[in-house]
Image (spheres, coloured by chain):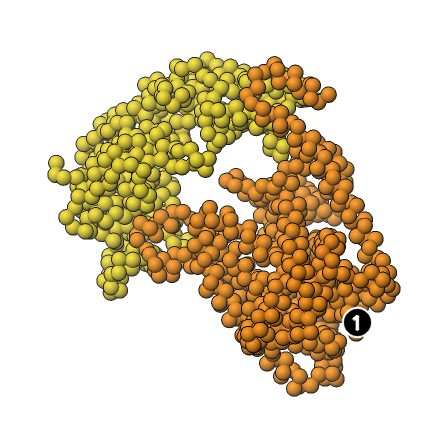
Chain colours: A yellow, B orange
């Protein structure tokens, strides 16, 4: 391999929280990007992938470590970015949006117009030059995003979940169009770095996948994809690859992360576990889906999230909470309903609430602790601050609030205890 | 009792820290404080109303003095006036806007009327109404009081009504459908859906008009009735007297008192209202930072306050449940022939009314006003217009870049935003004497150097709107601009300025409206016997008011109102429409 285009060494990054404490989002990232490859960063949301992208694009500078570009020409060092939310300027037409980057480079007007039109042509936006972004569909908007990035002739293209705001079909067309242009070398790009949480998308497009683990974000695995383009989603090599990555990502979930004191599959649960922010309806929905056809209690996770039309990072917390409530068990990229899970799926509304309450008390120590405190108080009431301060001995304020919110929504559904937002206090349902 | 019971509970479960105990103890404090506040407000209103209706001779026996120890009482009187005016404005809004929104025919006339009313300078109302009010209550202070309160009312009512009308017209269709499905009566629909939906906008506008109100409460307490000047007890009169007697100390005291009053009003009334009305926002996503108010917390956490307010809540609930007015029909009935006839009759009636009014205006103008007068007033209007335009441009040049700079830095914006709102509420006329002093000391040209006073109080609208706009500027667009290395002039032209444009327009409309209004007090300023006048429509109206020349006051005010309406129609509305179309973020 020749010298890499981009070299990241020992990148560590922390954000300062309002309370002054530091939150480490990235730890010791080493990454080389060679010419001619597409690399995907894959991981749960909040694992620092987007932060890394912003460090590479010099939008933020890392707390430690260095970013080095090895390219002889100035042009190859140029980095352009495509945004998840498109980030088009609503007051500029398509043409003006595309020209803006060139204007900043001081390109003469005639050349600017020529290059912008060429980029618009390349990306399939002919005829839309004078339209304003609000008149375009999501797919068209993202095409403008691509044209705007490509027109400045970048060496490296960064893409931050570029397809996740689009519907499935539109995203599909855009992905294949992009790969076609890439294979035909019609774009000035030397390499591409893409952030995604969609495993299939990563396998479809990239030459290498870096799987991120969270808290703090770090590269957990590196997988090379050698399937030739155009890749067939239904092909067995493709499916095997997707399956393998799924297993890597879900087993990572139940692997104890002792240094974080986080809830882990087998570790004894404690009052100050971090809890997934998942609504009772989502839990019930997944249990129901698993219990019914075609799974009958056992499902392959990749197949499941394909069938439910949800992103991996959306479904993983729900899967995690099924495990937490002992409605399901996760092993080897499969999820199996427990007996309790099956009974829950069969039950009517009121019975479900009872089962949920029972499992909440048994498996979520914080819920049972709060219930006990409320029960033993003469007026059956307690302020939120009472529990918040307790949690804050183990985590920061923001996390404590999130955990408390999660328990509150579960307890409300279970009719275990009530929460009054106005007075910020909890009470047992029928105190009077 | 409370405490012992609590400590049992505390021993049984290992307590984490002492936080709970302070919280519990605070509940009783909440009760005490909340109770005191309610009691104080009741006592204060009772006392104030008694004072307001005192015979007018009290003023002679007991005139305004400049002793600072009287200031708290004056401040209370002024505050009470404000409170009455804003209640009246609210009542007016709750009646006028629904009529205009519900009845197409009424709306056709009521809304343009409102637009005109809004364009009339606030002090213009004082000149006209004071005589009438005094005639109603000849021997009591009530007449003069009412005139002052009416002036504040006119500074607040119109834009509250317009905001409420807008909200009523934009109630989401699915809410309308829900009302129909549940067969809510017109009355129930109003209390259950329309009022809650309009609440955040209404509260925000109320707060904004309050800012305007302070300016005029100060200007309207010292009123000329006939040939006699009446000083109503209040901060405004205190200042007027301080100016007459050239007492700098007193002015400083008044500025201090005003600051405290505005702060208290904000903390005790508006902050809680804004925080409370936030729960009515018609959105399905939770906002990251909801507005907070310690006062609201206090009342919501105090059991006693809840008990005290309970009857009020009960009455409101009962009122809201009444089934007045028929439910909306599920289909619009086809309009019958007779309905169309009725329409024509209505338009004919309006036309007749307009003709009748026109005749009276023409007669009035032709008997008491010459063509030369009209030409003179038009010229004066031109001068004031030029002042407004130049000042808005200067203020924009200064505050737009600064506002963007501040707004993009959240830490800084959190500081500046409340400050700018405070400055907008602060009656700038308190600083006018300083201008007189400077101008006469340095022998400056009054036509130029009096001008900045017009915008002293209203420039802040530009600042805090731009700050607000810049602070909600989407982060991804900022990153895109950075990534594509858009800098300096290109960044201002293509990124920042268009980004805050809708907010800037909102601010500039408020600022220019305020500047027109302020011209009446700021083009003619005095300090003791020294008086400095700038040529312009404002000073013309002020001069005519002093002379008690009603025909010419009417001419001046009519001209100003016309110019404001024309400015709105031909400059601000088109700009506002463009901002809403082209520059909004989806």
Q: Residue at x 61, y 57 (%)?
A: B426
Which residue is pictured at 48% across the width and 14% down the height? A340
The quarter in which the N terminus of chain B is drawn is top right
Asked which quadrant contains residue B93, the reply is bottom right
Total numbered labels placed on residues in the image? 1
| Relative horizontal placement of residue B499, taking residue A111 as reference (left or right) | right
Residue B75's x, y, as percent?
71, 54
Give the vertical position of B316 relative to A127 (above or below).
above
**Res. A416 visible in picture:** yes
Residue A400: x %, y % from top left: 49, 28
Q: Nearer the viewer, residue B296 or B258?
A: B258
The residue that appears at 23% across and 62% down in the rendered structure is A111
Quadrant position of residue B529? bottom right
In the image shown, does A248 or B385 lie closer to the viewer? Answer: B385
Q: Nearer the viewer, residue B224 or B574?
A: B224
Residue B259 appears left or right of A366: right
Write down the quadrant of residue B281 in the picture: top right
Please tell me whether residue A40 is drawn above or below residue B410 in the rendered image. above
The residue closer to the viewer here, B26 or A425, is B26
**What is the x, y in percent for residue A10?**
25, 33
Kindly tell me whether residue B105 is visible in this rendering. Answer: no
Q: Chain of mark 1?
A: B
Circle 1 packing at 10 Å, graded few (<14), some (14-19), many (20+), is few
| Disc 1 element | strand
Q: Identify the residue position indicated by label 1 in the image.
A: B228
* Residue at (58% x, 57% y) in the render: B424
Q: Position of residue B502 (x, y in %)?
A: 49, 58
The residue at the far left in this view is A2
């Amino acid at each position: 391999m020749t010298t890499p285009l981009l070299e990241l060494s020992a990148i560590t990054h922390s954000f300062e929280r309002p309370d002054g404490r530091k939150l480490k989002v990235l730890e010791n990232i080493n990454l080389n990007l060679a010419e001619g490859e597409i690399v995907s960063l894959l991981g749960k949301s909040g694992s620092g992938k987007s932060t890394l992208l912003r460090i590479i694009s010099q939008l933020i500078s890392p707390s430690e470590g260095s970013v080095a570009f090895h390219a002889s020409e100035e042009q190859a060092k140029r980095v352009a970015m495509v945004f998840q939310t498109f980030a088009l300027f609503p007051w500029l037409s398509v043409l003006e949006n595309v020209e803006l980057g060139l204007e900043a480079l001081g390109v003469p007007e005639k050349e600017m117009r020529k290059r912008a039109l060429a980029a618009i042509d390349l990306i399939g936006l002919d005829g839309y030059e004078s339209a304003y972004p609000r008149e375009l569909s999501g797919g068209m908007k993202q095409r403008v995003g691509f044209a705007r990035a490509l027109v400045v002739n970048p060496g490296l293209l960064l893409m931050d979940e570029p397809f996740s705001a689009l519907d499935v079909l539109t995203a599909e067309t855009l992905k294949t169009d992009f790969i076609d242009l890439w294979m035909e070398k019609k774009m000035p790009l030397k390499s591409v770095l893409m952030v995604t949480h969609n495993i299939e998308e990563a396998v479809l497009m990239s030459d290498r996948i870096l799987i991120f683990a969270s808290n703090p974000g770090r590269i957990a695995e590196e997988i090379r994809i050698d399937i030739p383009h155009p890749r067939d989603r239904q092909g067995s090599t493709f499916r095997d690859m997707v399956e393998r990555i799924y297993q890597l990502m879900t087993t990572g979930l139940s692997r104890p992360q002792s240094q974080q004191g986080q809830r882990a599959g087998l570790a004894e649960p404690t009052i100050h576990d971090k809890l997934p922010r998942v609504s009772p309806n989502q839990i019930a929905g997944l249990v129901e889906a698993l219990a019914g056809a075609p799974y009958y209690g056992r499902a392959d996770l990749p197949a499941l999230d394909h069938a439910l039309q949800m992103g991996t990072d959306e479904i993983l917390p729900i899967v995690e909470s099924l495990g937490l409530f002992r409605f399901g068990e996760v092993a080897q990229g499969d999820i199996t309903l427990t007996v309790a899970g099956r009974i829950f799926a069969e039950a009517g509304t009121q019975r479900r609430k009872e089962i949920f309450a029972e499992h909440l008390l048994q498996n979520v120590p914080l819920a049972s602790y709060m219930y006990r405190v409320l029960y033993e108080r003469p007026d059956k009431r307690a302020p939120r601050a009472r529990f918040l301060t307790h949690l804050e001995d183990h985590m920061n304020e923001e996390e404590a609030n999130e955990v408390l919110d999660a328990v509150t929504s579960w307890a409300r559904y279970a009719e275990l205890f009530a929460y009054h937002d106005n007075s910020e206090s909890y009470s047992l349902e029928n105190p009077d | 009792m409370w405490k012992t019971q609590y400590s049992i509970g505390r021993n049984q479960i290992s307590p984490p820290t002492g936080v709970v105990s302070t919280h519990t103890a605070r509940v009783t404090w909440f009760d005490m404080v909340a109770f005191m506040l309610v009691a104080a407000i009741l006592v204060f209103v009772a006392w104030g109303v008694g004072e307001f209706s005192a015979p007018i001779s009290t003023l002679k026996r007991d005139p305004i003095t400049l002793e600072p120890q009287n200031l708290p009482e004056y401040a209370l009187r002024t505050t009470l006036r404000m409170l009455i005016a804003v209640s009246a404005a609210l009542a007016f809004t709750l009646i006028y806007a629904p009529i205009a929104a519900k009845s197409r025919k009424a709306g056709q006339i009521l809304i343009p009327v409102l637009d005109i009313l809004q364009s009339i300078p606030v002090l213009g109302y004082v000149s006209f109404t004071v005589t009438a009010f005094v005639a109603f209550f000849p021997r009591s202070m009530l007449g003069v009081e009412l005139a002052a309160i009416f002036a504040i009312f006119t500074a607040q009512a119109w834009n509250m009504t317009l905001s409420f009308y807008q909200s009523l017209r934009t109630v989401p269709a699915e809410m309308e459908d829900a009302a129909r499905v549940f067969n809510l009566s017109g009355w129930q629909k109003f209390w259950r859906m329309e009022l809650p939906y309009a609440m955040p906008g209404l509260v925000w506008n109320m707060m904004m008009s309050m800012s305007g109100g302070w300016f005029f409460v100060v200007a309207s307490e010292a009123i000329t009735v006939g040939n006699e000047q009446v000083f109503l007890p209040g901060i405004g009169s205190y200042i007027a007297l301080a100016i007459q007697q050239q007492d700098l100390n007193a002015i400083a005291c008044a500025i201090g008192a005003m600051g405290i009053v505005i702060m208290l009003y904000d903390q005790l009334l508006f902050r809680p209202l804004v925080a409370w009305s936030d729960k009515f926002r018609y959105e399905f996503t939770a906002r990251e930072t909801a507005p907070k108010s310690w006062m609201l917390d206090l009342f919501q956490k105090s059991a006693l306050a809840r008990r005290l307010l309970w009857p009020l809540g009960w009455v409101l609930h009962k009122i809201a449940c009444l089934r007045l007015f028929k439910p909306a029909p599920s289909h619009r009935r086809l309009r019958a022939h007779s309905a169309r006839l009725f329409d024509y009759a209505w338009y004919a009636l309006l036309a007749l009314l307009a003709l009748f009014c026109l005749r009276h205006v023409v007669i009035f103008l032709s008997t008491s006003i010459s063509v030369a007068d009209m030409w003179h007033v038009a010229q004066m209007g031109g001068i004031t217009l030029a002042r407004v335009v130049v000042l808005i441009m200067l203020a924009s040049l200064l505050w737009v870049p600064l506002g963007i700079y501040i707004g993009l830095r959240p830490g800084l914006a959190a500081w500046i935003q409340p400050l700018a709102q405070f400055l907008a509420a602060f009656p700038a006329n308190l600083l006018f004497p300083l201008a007189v002093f400077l101008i006469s000391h340095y022998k400056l040209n009054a036509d130029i150097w009096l001008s900045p006073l017009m915008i002293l109080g209203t420039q802040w609208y530009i600042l805090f709107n731009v700050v607000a706009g810049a602070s909600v500027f989407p982060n991804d667009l900022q990153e895109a601009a950075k990534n594509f290395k858009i800098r300096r002039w290109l960044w201002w032209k293509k990124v920042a300025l268009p980004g805050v444009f809708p907010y800037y327009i909102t601010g500039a409309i408020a600022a220019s409206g305020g500047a027109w209004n302020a011209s009446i007090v700021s083009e003619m300023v005095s300090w003791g016997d020294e008086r400095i006048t700038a040529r312009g429509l404002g000073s013309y109206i002020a001069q005519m008011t002093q002379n008690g020349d009603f025909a010419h006051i009417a001419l001046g005010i009519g001209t100003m109102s016309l110019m404001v309406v024309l400015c709105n129609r031909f400059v601000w509305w088109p700009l506002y429409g463009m901002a809403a179309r082209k520059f909004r973020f989806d």
